[in-house]
């Protein structure tokens, strides 16, 4: 069975209030436009998740809210504390507990960049994949019976999008 992961780093956040707790930082205006553009791109390509796993930070929640406006109906969402600055193994545990053929995961660097690199059998030709800038979104397919069967170095990058290319 083909399983599809839509892996998105949160959109650009605001540093307007430097004393704010990191987890509470919102998106800035560019981040809001980027999240909307990623959602529109995903919907236009037919990449609509059945389930979204989202970090509990303000910027990831806002990214999800703006991306998901493009999906009708809106997928089920689970906000997971462990995804906030989660290490690759933590992200893998969350993914392996998911259900449905298509899952979106929204989290943070550096964990999401290392997670993306570890998931795929071959890196795509775009060097930005390794940096995973804000809003970066990879569509990664796996041949597995369910998410618990997904293993490192087995995914194939089907599509890759960056907000700077979309807005």
Image (spheres, rainbow, N blue to C red):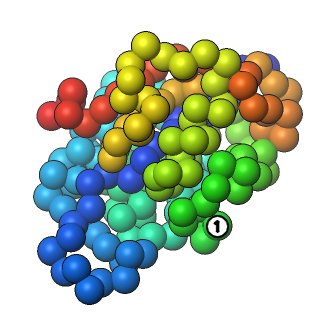
Please give the name of the residue rendered at 14% of the width and 58% of the height, measured from the top-left corner: 29
Please give the name of the residue rendered at 37% of the width and 83% of the height, measured from the top-left corner: 21
Nearer to the camera, 60 or 47: 60
Percent x, y of residue 13 = 27, 61
Please give the name of the residue rendered at 22% of the width and 54% of the height, measured from the top-left corner: 32
Q: From where the camera sits, is residue 96 visible?
A: yes
Please give the name of the residue rendered at 28% of the width and 70% of the height, measured from the top-left corner: 26
Q: From where the camera sits, is residue 69 visible?
A: no
Quadrant location, the C terminus = top left
Judged left or right of residue 40, residue 127 is right
Judged left or right of residue 143, residue 24 is left
**Dot 1 surroundings within 10 Å: few (below 14), some, or many (20 or more)?**
some
Percent x, y of residue 27 = 25, 63
Residue corresponding to mark 1: 82
Residue 130 against residue 135 in the figure, above or below? above
Residue 13 against residue 38 in the figure, above or below? below
């Amino acid at each position: 069975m083909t399983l599809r992961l839509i892996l998105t780093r949160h959109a650009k956040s605001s540093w307007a209030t430097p004393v704010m707790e990191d987890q509470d930082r919102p998106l800035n205006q560019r981040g809001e436009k980027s999240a909307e553009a990623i959602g529109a791109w995903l919907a236009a390509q037919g990449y609509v998740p059945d389930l979204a796993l989202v970090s509990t930070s303000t910027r990831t929640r806002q990214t999800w809210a703006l991306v998901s406006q493009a999906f009708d109906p809106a997928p089920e969402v689970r906000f997971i504390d462990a995804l906030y600055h989660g290490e690759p193994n933590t992200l893998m545990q969350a993914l392996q507990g998911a259900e449905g053929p298509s899952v979106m995961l929204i989290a943070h660097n550096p964990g999401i960049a290392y997670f993306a690199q570890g998931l795929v059998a071959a890196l795509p030709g775009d060097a930005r994949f390794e940096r995973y800038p804000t809003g970066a979104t990879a569509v990664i397919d796996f041949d597995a019976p369910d998410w618990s069967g997904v293993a490192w170095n087995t995914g194939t990058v089907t599509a890759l999008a960056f907000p700077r290319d979309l807005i």
